[in-house]
Amino acid sequence: MNRQAKGRTPRRPPRNPPSSQKDPVGVYCRVRPLGVEDEECCIDVISSTTIQLHAPEGFKTNRNGEYKETQYSFKKVFGISISQIELFEHVAKPLVEDLIHGKNGLLFTYGVTGSGKTFTMTGSPGQGGLLPRSLDMIFNSIGPYQTKRYVFKTDDKNGMEIQNEVDALLERQRRENNLPAPKTTSSRQKLDPEIADMIQPEEAYKTDGVDEDSSYSVFVSYVEIYNNYIYDLLEETQEDVIKPKPPQSKILREDQNHNMYVAGCMEVEVKSAEETFQVFWRGQKKRKVANTRLNRESSRSHSVFIIKLAQAPLDADGDNILQDKNQVTVSQLCLVDLAGSERTGRTGAEGTRIREAGNINQSLLNLRTCMEVLRENQMCGTNRMVPYRDSKVTHLFKNYFDGEGKVRMVVNVNPKADDYEETLLVMRFAEMTQEVEVARPADKPIWGFTPGRRNRNQAFKDELSRKLEERGGPIERDLSSALNHLVSSLPPLPSSEVTDPHDEITLPRLIEALQNRHRIRQMMIEEYNKAAIMMKSTLQNMDSNLISKDTFIHELNGKLMEKDKVVQSNKAEIERLEKKNKLLEHKFDILQKTTKTYEVDKRSLQQELETREQRLQRELNEKRRMEQRLHGVVSDTQHKWEKECERRVNAKQMEMQNKLWVKDEKLKQLKAIVTEGKTPGRPDPPPRQTQPPPQRPSRDERLPAKRSASPSPIPTTTPVRPMHRRSHSAGGEKWVDHKPASSLDLGTVMQPVIPNAIQVSTPSEKALSKCDRYVLTHQEIASDGEIRTKLIKGDVLKTRGGGQSVQFTDIETLKQQLAAAPGRKRKSSEGTSGDGSDGVWTDVETRCAVGMGMRAGSNMGPGLEHQGITKRRKP
């Protein structure tokens, strides 16, 4: 009985709509056990998410040679005692569940050569790795819902087509006749011994939430990237012993959904985990491996095992797959075993091995570069182009990093000390990769059909069979037995053998039996019609209920779409707010740094201000002290100048009195001469004789006579004693009067009087420090018998070393002549006598004033120069 599909909705939205939510790349770390127990270990597992690296002995981690320890955090750290099943539960199981629900996934292992990447991915007998356990979980989950072979068919453009049962049957027959497909083995003993007992029965996993209204099929492909070329490991080529053909490299192309795929790669449809692993192992034997110092079978290429899961919904009746290509969902899980990064110096590679290692390191370097650019674009908001095309590895998986599915990475490390430098680089790459975020793929629901179609169809078939069995009707699964039962339920036919042409009993009896059978047949038809009518009404009721439920579901779908729109708008708003929050956090960090800078500047300016205030206060205090000092100096100077003025006035008065006295004396002498000239009977003057030089008066004779109010005439025979000469430059300064012992001791003759003077025979540092002026007094007898006094004056200055020096500024020379000494005479024109006698000649006081200004050096030594100007004047 066929039922019409009702309540179908329009076509679903496009595949893989962009998602606003992002998840970071999940990075896990697995530590390999040491090969030798006594070997030095450089890695310690601190917690379930943190490991610590410490430099081995004799290794310097920085330029200073200091011992340095670094810690790295991961999503999960698996120590040396972790089992393969525990690793699968945390790493690969979520990716398998997403694969069954229509989402893509990428899982790759990364590490140094010999760190355990291949063991983690493949495993060994009894310790199956991530790949065999993922296959086992996939088939355990979708086993009852798999389609027959060739119902799903791959095209050459990374798409999937659907064939009906007849075309699939013809395809199977053609393939079985030409190239028989591998059959599923039922016994583990028939498997390759290298893949036998990979997974124990008690370790099998099965996911929940499988869509029972869909049919599934699994396709696998296996490629390797060797020297940046892609080769198909499952490609079947006819081997030529004489001229073997090298494998042909494949190219990458982009499908209509902008997904990258390997063009011309063979995809094998598999129906069990054992069959899939046999296909994998067939390709694994073709993979490029080589023997190096670090590993006996070192991978020389990157291997990529791709698992494609195609699923399509059943039709409305739940009997067959819906023949609509747009309703097919294809999800894939890529399991990548990257070749190990290595240094050629350690591996001892030569020739081809060097080229292989260079290409491996270059591809891994490009992977790091792509991760760095992605992180920079996401964290800094830049839009740099990611160099996916520089390497086949990154170009193939470009879609995953652009948001086609989850990305997981298992970092394998070897804790031995020889791998410490390479392990540091691996840790830095893993730490940087964790900061890269990948857009979360959107869910891919199948719209337009009522869920539970497969179960309802199977329940309907079971119920129909039961009803027919109860009423004696045919059962589809055993039609011959049902027909036999129906025939046996009718009345038996009597014997129809007629031996006599006049037999009138056999024919009526046969007619009666046939009439009974016809009546029973009519009754059964009526009962069947009643049952059919009843079933039809039941189906109509069910259809009406189904229509109402479909209508209700459509309403709910409409509300759900509205809710989805609201959710999408909220997600967009959340993303905008998150970006704004990141921007504000960035600005806040900048403001915090600026604030800290300003605070440091403020503190420095405050300190400078305090220092300047202290300096200003000191200067003010110094200014006050200086004012007080200057005030005292001014008062002292004023007092000194008052005394000096008084002294100068007194000196001037004394000088005027001396001049007046000299004039009085001269007048007295003139009067005496005039009186003497008028005396009669004066004898002629005696002839002129040369007189001897006058004798120097003694010290007592040089003492000045006391002045009187009216000066008395001085006898001509008594010499005029010289007076003390007072120095007028003595001011208010303090002098050092240096009178050497070698100078003449002439008593009071030509001895200058200097106030405030300290008289010393030899100047000492102490005497110089107390005075600010210096005078050197030197007396000698000149060639003409006169007494000459030299006053050499100077200033006392302080030197930089803390001592004193003398700077000469003036030299004064004094000469004095006695009154009785011969001198120039002039004839007086006054007081001539009447008798015509000549005037007398008088002695003239000779004064010598020599002024000279000069400057000398800072030491008291010879080298003085002076000029003297001698003036004579008459009274």
Image: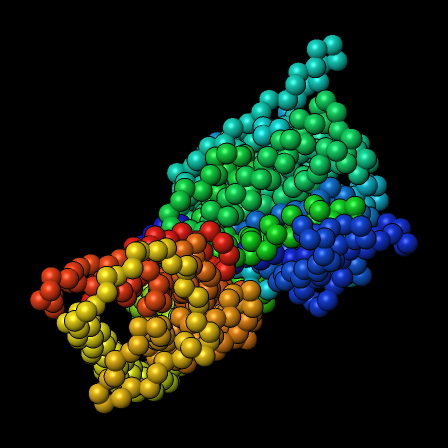
The front one of 410 and 618 is 618
Residue at the extreme top of the image, as rendered: 242
User: Against 286, is 244 above or below?
Assistant: above
Whether residue 539 is visible: no
Residue at the spot 73% in from the left edge and 58% down from the top edge: 67
Picture quarter with the C terminus: bottom left
The front one of 437 and 293 is 293
Picture quarter with the N terminus: bottom left
Q: Position of residue 535 (x, y in %)?
A: 44, 66
Q: Which picture quadrant has residue 819?
A: bottom left
Residue at the spot 54% in from the left edge and 34% down from the top edge: 392
User: Against 775, is 419 above or below?
Assistant: above
User: Against 632, is 183 above or below?
Assistant: above
The front one of 504 and 538 is 538
Position of residue 216 in the picture relative to residue 10 (left or right): right
> Tag count in the figure?
0
Colouring method of the image: rainbow
The front one of 74 and 213 is 74
Residue at the spot 55% in from the left edge and 64% down from the top edge: 742
Residue at the spot 82% in from the left edge and 48% down from the top edge: 125
Position of residue 407 in the picture relative to residue 157 (left or right): right
Q: Position of residue 77 (x, y in %)?
A: 69, 61
User: Against 768, is 33 above or below?
Assistant: above
Whether residue 708 is visible: yes
Residue at the extreme bottom of the image, as rendered: 709
Q: Position of residue 530 (x, y in %)?
A: 43, 67
Q: Position of residue 329 (x, y in %)?
A: 47, 49
Residue at the extreme front of the image, as rendered: 681
Position of residue 577 in the picture relative to residue 513 (left or right): left
